[in-house]
Image: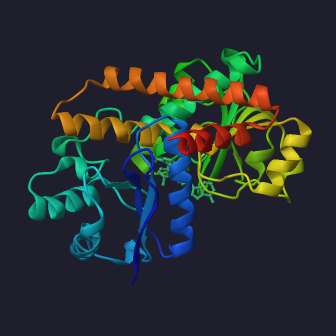
Amino acid sequence: MIGFRVQHNNTSGPFKGGIRYHEHVDIDEVRSLATLMTWKTSLLDIPYGGGKGGIGVDPTKFSKTELERMSRRFFRAIDPIIGVNVDIPAPDVNTNAQVMSWFMDEYSQIHGYSPAIVTGKPLELGGSEGREAATGKGTAIITRESAGKWDIDLQDSKIVIQGFGNVGSYAAKFLHEYGCKIIAVSDVTGGLFDPDGLDITSLIEYNNKNGTIKGFSQGDLVSNEDILNIECDFLIPAALGGVIHKMNVEKLNCRVIIEAANGPVTPPADDILFKKGVYVVPDILTNAGGVTVSYFEWVQNLQQFQWTEEEVNDKLENKMVAAFNEVSSMMKSKKTSMRMAAFAVAIDRVAKS
Ligand code: NAD
């Protein structure tokens, strides 16, 4: 098996980005994800650069002991190029707080107690309040700000969410709390649709208990392909990359796409949507809540201090709204798409620093 750590840019601060375990991991994927991290941290004005890592394995075929041995060996191998002020890994696809604990322990055996070497740790080892919900919360904040920008009545808006994992379910929870109507959601097994709005609180409870939305009592069944075509104000793809492409983009029926997943809209589809006047709020803005609270975790670790959930959420709110407003101004002054505006803000900041 081969593992990678790519360090794309550290002009504005230490390299920052997750480590994923997936059989499709290769050097090109890790390079492109590392690049995106540079623009994401820059856009949020966080003093970090961009990095990413991964091991090309299917972790479901491993025992817990094998996973631990592999994780520790990988971290020891990258030890010479990482550090609390050099490169700070985090969880990504198929890695979690347990893997971060092994990483931290391995590093601490060499360098002494060092919680700031990774983020996404359990609370007991210096993790941050609010980290688990952060990407979904950030997605909800960005949806709310988009409603204000494009004069959509948030309380009256209809929302469709593809994917009901960490990001999708927390986004649904917070949007539901804002008073929005979530009319359809899906996971890998398929979707549920109710034009009057799903009972999100019960659905989250059901999903937490069963690990899927399949079998929930409310809503008509809908496929993952058809869920994208439901008429709505906000379509939130929160599962996989590349789900909105040249072949299905004409069938969409939404006013705004909020890219909660990484890269859910392909470049050709993006061009078509721009010409049709459908707004696309880009991933590097929408899903930046996760890395923002990762940054807060690191800051708390360096100070050996713990913030309350309320403090974390207030700071997250401020960062997300500031980035949204900056991108909006750039969009207006350059008369361009929101994605182009987000990249312009991010690249400009790196260039200046
Ligand atoms: P997750 O594994 O918790 O959830 C993924 C969800 O997508 C699950 O509900 C799963 O059933 C569903 N899904 C899988 N295949 C599907 C398919 N073919 N059709 C429809 N649904 C399908 O993952 P997550 O952490 O929620 O991440 C979702 C996306 O958000 C990914 O693109 C990830 O890269 C991105 N993201 C996540 C974070 C984070 O903090 N978790 C941060 C930034 C970006």
What residue appears at the point 88 percent right and 48 percent down from the top-left corner? 272
Q: Position of residue 268 (x, y in %)?
A: 83, 56
173 lies left or right of 241: left
Q: Position of residue 323 (x, y in %)?
A: 57, 29
Along the line of sight, which residue is nearer the eye, 31 or 105? Answer: 31
Q: Position of residue 239 (x, y in %)?
A: 59, 52
20 lies left or right of 329: left
Along the line of sight, which residue is nearer the eye, 236 or 276? Answer: 276
Q: Position of residue 203 (x, y in %)?
A: 51, 36
The chosen color scheme is rainbow
- The N terminus - image quarter: bottom left
What residue appears at the point 75 percent right and 19 percent down from the top-left corner? 152
Would residue 205 be seen by someone viewing this image from the given angle? no
What residue appears at the point 72 percent right and 20 percent down from the top-left corner? 149
Q: How many marks?
A: 0
259 lies left or right of 276: left
Give the residue at the far front of this rendering.
352
Residue 313 higher or lower than 127, as above or below? above
The image quarter containing residue 21 is bottom left
What residue appears at the point 29 percent right and 70 percent down from the top-left corner? 78
